[in-house]
Image: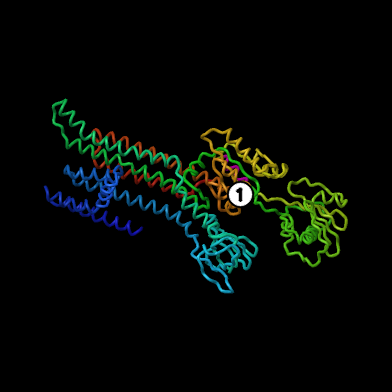
Amino acid sequence: MTKKQKKVLARIIISAVLAAVMLLLPVSGFLRFVLFLIPYLIIGYDILKKAVYGILNRQMFDENFLMATATIGAIALGEYTEGVAVMLFYQIGELFQSYAVGKSRRNISALMDIRPDYAGILEDGIIKKVDPDEVKIGSVIVIQPGEKCPIDGVVIEGSSTLNTSALTGESVPRDIGEGDEIISGCINMTGVLKVRTTKEFGESTVSKILDLVENSGMKKSKSENFISKFAKYYTPIVCLGAVLLAIAPPLIRLCFMGASPQFDVWVYRALTFLVISCPCALVISIPLSFFAGIGGAGREGILVKGSNYLETLSKIRYIVFDKTGTITHGIFKVVGIHHSRLSDEKLLWYAAHAEAFSVHPISKSIIEAYGSKPDAGIVKDVREIGGNGVTATVDGVSVAVGNAKLMESIGIVHMDCHESGTIVHMAIDGEYQGHIVISDVIKPTSQKAVEALRKSGVKRIIMLTGDIERTANKTAECVGITEVYSELLPADKVGKVEELIALKSDKEKLAFVGDGINDAPVLSRADIGIAMGALGSDAAIEAADVVLMDDDPLKIVLAVKIAGKCLRIVYENIYFAIGIKIICLLLGAVGVANMWLAIFADVGVMVIAVLNAIRALFVKNIRM
């Protein structure tokens, strides 16, 4: 609890105790008025001050004005107990609301803990602590155990374990070593790391995440905009209604019925009407619901750039996936060796040494599968044939590693492969020795994500990719996607998304999930773009509306469920608050409701609505 909240709590307790004492004292008349004025001013002086400032600034139609008018009116009519009670319970409601907003804000602010305080830059063998903004691209920084990584870069020396939970929501630490990329915001847990920076602080991952979080409240949903407009017109209308209720019935009684006007009765009803009409529950709980929803998602490694996108997420009925880096890992791996008369280990030995000087991703995957650094000293006569493969002499033996075209060019009869992926044929000493199958590995959660999305109400799931048809169809079949469009250029993907958007209704929303720089145009064109944030390109993250920090497609399902829960809470609060208000306003107008019911209609409804809104924070119990 903050100092300000503690002060308000102290005022509430003191005022409540004093009011209770006043009730027991056998006093009346002016002395009773003065005694009740003490707890009233203790609990309500700040509300009265805000009401005066609102009037002076010509912004009088707010809850402070309503509370001040109603309580002063009640005291003027001799209802001292009710005047103090209304202000007392209103402050209790405000304190509760302040605590709830603080809890939600602290949840989001936990993300802000990833902001680094300094960067340890290495200059002339000395570690100098500087502001991260001062570190240039290509600088060498040292990250000690327990320190946050301040800027994105590549590890040039050392190995360690990283805590990435603040970024991804994943509690399992990640091992990192020389040559691995490291993103800012992670916490170095064990070894000392030397990192060469690849970005400036303003362009680094941590800086962009903080910017997304800080600006998420700027983009309001339709529900929030509705509430803002509703409150703008609603408050002046109810104030006018209260004035008419205080004046019109007495005048009608006096002029047309010849009866006593009973001004005190109708003024009391008008004041009750004012207390009931205060729109606090709506104005506070709706933004709080979205704020809590964004906070709960952020804690799970799902960054939503605004509450409008949270609302759109809940209406997704079409979802389009890119393949590489989204459904698959985007990393090539050896998945099979076929038709070899040598052992798999020996074949990989020859292949890895022949590819020792190549920087092609296929070459890297072969060397990785071999498991050791090839001995370049035994490799001679290396000839890399663009688009075909490599020939070399390895330890005195001629080796050819490449595609079918390379085999045909050197007169080697090769065998086709029934599996999808990149097929690397091998010829050793002029004889065919089989082929290596290299493929992009499907993420373990991709199939489960597709199944869960269908169950959650998504009508069509489509995959768009630039890969060849056979590879695309095989991947789609493995994860359960039946609509596939392959061999597409970035412009073709945009065109296909345009076609799908034209087919759906206005209420249905289309999401595109991608990770590469070539996906940025499609991410921008879709109703909502979802980017893979851990390995995704800067352009894709910039263009997307939702960023998944751990690249797990199953998090899309969680994001949709969080959005759905948040929207349900929003509509529950809208219907509940407006419904109770209307009933109590009618009861107050006809004299059935007194100030005590007015207190429930205002403060009670607000507390219930805020309690309901806080539920959006808790996403752990959402069933996947």
Is 452 included in the stretch rendered in magenta? yes
Counting labels gives 1
Return the residue nearer the eye: 617 or 374.
Answer: 374
Report the colour scheme. rainbow
SS for callout 1: loop
- Would residue 373 be seen by someone viewing this image from the given angle? yes
User: Where's residue 618, x and y in %?
Assistant: 46, 50
Q: Is residue 602 left or right of residue 383?
A: left
- Would residue 480 be seen by someone viewing this image from the given angle? no
Q: Is residue 273 left or right of residue 549?
A: left
The quarter holding residue 223 reads top left
Which quarter of the figure is the N terminus placed in?
Answer: bottom left
Q: Is residue 155 left or right of residue 235?
A: right
User: Where's residue 392, x and y in %?
Assistant: 82, 60
Which residue position is annotated with label 1?
A: 515
Classed neighbour count for the residue bearing mark 1: other residues with Cα under 10 Å, few (<14), some (14–19), many (≥20): many
Query: What span is in magenta?
Result: 444-454
Return the residue nearer the eye: 65 or 589.
Answer: 65
Is 606 included in the stretch rendered in magenta? no
User: Where's residue 545, x and y in %?
Assistant: 53, 46
Q: Is residue 318 above or below residue 348?
A: above
Residue at position x 57%, y 68% from top?
142
User: Residue type at mark 1?
Assistant: Asp
